[in-house]
Image (spheres, rainbow, N blue to C red):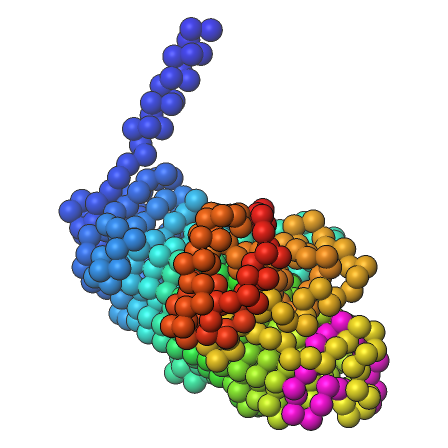
Amino acid sequence: MRRILLIAAFVLCSTQVWARTISVPFEYPSIQSAINDANDDDVIIVDPNTYRENISFRGKAITVTSLDPNDPNVVASTVIDGSEPADSNFASVVTFNSGEDNNTVLSGFTITGGTGSWLLVSWEYKGLQWNRCGGGVICYNMSEPTISKNVFIGNSAGQGGGIYIYGDPVNPNDPSNPATHVSPVITDNSFIENSAITEHGFAPPDTNYPNNDHGDGGAIVGFQGCDAIITGNFIENNHADYYGGGIHCRQWSNGYVENNQIISNTSALGAGVHITYTSSPTVRDNLIQANTAGSLGGGGIYVYYLSTPLIERNTITENTSSNGAGIGVYSNSLPTIRNNLIYKNLAGAGMRIVGSDPVIAHNTITHNAKSGIDCESNSNPAIEHNIITSNEDGWGIWVHQDNSIVIRYNNLWGNSLGTCGPAIPDQTGINGNICVWPQFVNPDSNDYHLNYDSGCINAGDPNYEAEAGETDFEGDPRIIGGRIDIGADEYAFGEISDFSGDGIVNFNDFAILAYYWVDSLCTDPDWCEGCDYDQSSTVDIEDLKTFAENWLWQSN
């Protein structure tokens, strides 16, 4: 027994000894030379400089990091420039192709100059095709690293200008196939001015298979069984010739797209996020703004071909396409679109549905250039509990004559051509639908919370039962009053009277209201700390009545 314990202690000590911290360039002149000599669990720390390399992690569970990934100045001055590859067929700046898992980490670099690597990719219905993939980073052979706090700038490829992840070459959703999806972690990076282009100037290494570079995924591509965790990234001014100026999820790719800022990206369709071919990611809590797609559709988000994503709690605004400026849903897709704020999108409808049956619930869809929702032929969505108001050049809901649509408990006020049409009549007073001014707090400053006297409060289905943990746009409980509200925002009764912010409406708050009583200077609602509920410029008896209604309210 003593001999066994001694051997175990020796093994443990050996493991601790061999987990090293390696310095570049002091111990090794290049990042690749350090990786070549590293073992699992080693940490390679790279000093600021420009490293003209194209590196591969070679399957090692190591961390390669700058001096301080949290310091933007360090990240900006620690550059991996892949513009001088030894072999032009393999010109991605960073390669993961040996089954690396989440314990392999790349963090804190500026990654630039990559032009991608040739990869034989299995396309559904097309077979194997050459693609030029992953300008900044390429991941394949079931690799799923952690990529965090980097800046990807000025990289290009045919597919995935910033990052390209390729999962299993066979269908991972096939029950007879034991393969699993890959789940790389892509978090807290910036993707700026990367591109996915068809005319990249490189010829594939042989002609046994055709070249099918389609120009997809300006910043990120998750392809074929890729369940990427894409969180907290800043994705701006990227371009794809065809699909997904920002993010492209294709062929059985799911995962999470959460808490990202996806701004001013361009492509032919799906300029912000493109989801296609039976993919079902969760797209949640993102800002999707000012992305521009062509006439094919989906300025903000495009969903295509049997895809079933969950799209919730996003702000989708100022995106442009004549064919679904905010969201486009096409070709037998069944997304759930709920609790989103979809406003001021340009050139087209807030949402366009073609040949699909999505669930569209609890959204606020307002001030878009065309209709709130366009329902083209063979589309039968369930449209419930939405505010669809003030859309500028169309109906609240445009309905094709061939459709059979469920429209319940919506507010359809102030749309230029009317509530619903042309194939169905006005729905006001039918199935709980109303047509009233929604009483937003301040739409001029994009504040679409409900005022205390909004007709959308407690106006939803009286029999609606919220799911466990169900929330509104801001994460508040989905039923706060007597019954569910209409729209993305659930009105927080009492919260507006908690002037002191201590979680309860009590004498502390009454003292604040009394301080501003009959204050003739209350010309701005913020001036009186919110005490002037009705914005009459005076804190008076009407405001006192509202305050009394909320007496002893407490936050959860």
Residue 477, image x and y in percent? 63, 54
Q: Can you see residue 423?
A: yes
Q: Quarter of the image holding residue 462?
A: bottom right
Q: Residue 513, relative to residue 538: is it above or below?
A: above
On screen, residue 304 versus residue 432, left or right, reads left
**Which residue appears at 28% of the width and 36% of the height?**
20
Is 118 or 280 nearer to us in this picture? 280
Residue 396 x %, y %: 69, 84
> Residue at 64% of width from left, 80% of height from top?
437
Is 410 magenta? The answer is yes
Along the viewing direction, whichever of 205 and 476 lies nearer the viewer: 476
Q: Indicate whether 92 appears above or below 156.
A: above
The image quadrant that residue 77 belongs to is bottom left
Residue displayed at 54% across by 83% down: 345
Instruction: List x then y, in percent, for residue 53.
Output: 27, 62
Task: Give the extent of the magenta segment.
Answer: 399-420
Q: Residue furthest top?
A: 2
Residue 178 in the figure: left or right of residue 1: right
Residue 107: where, in percent of width, then height? Answer: 34, 53
Up-down: is 520 above or below 105? below
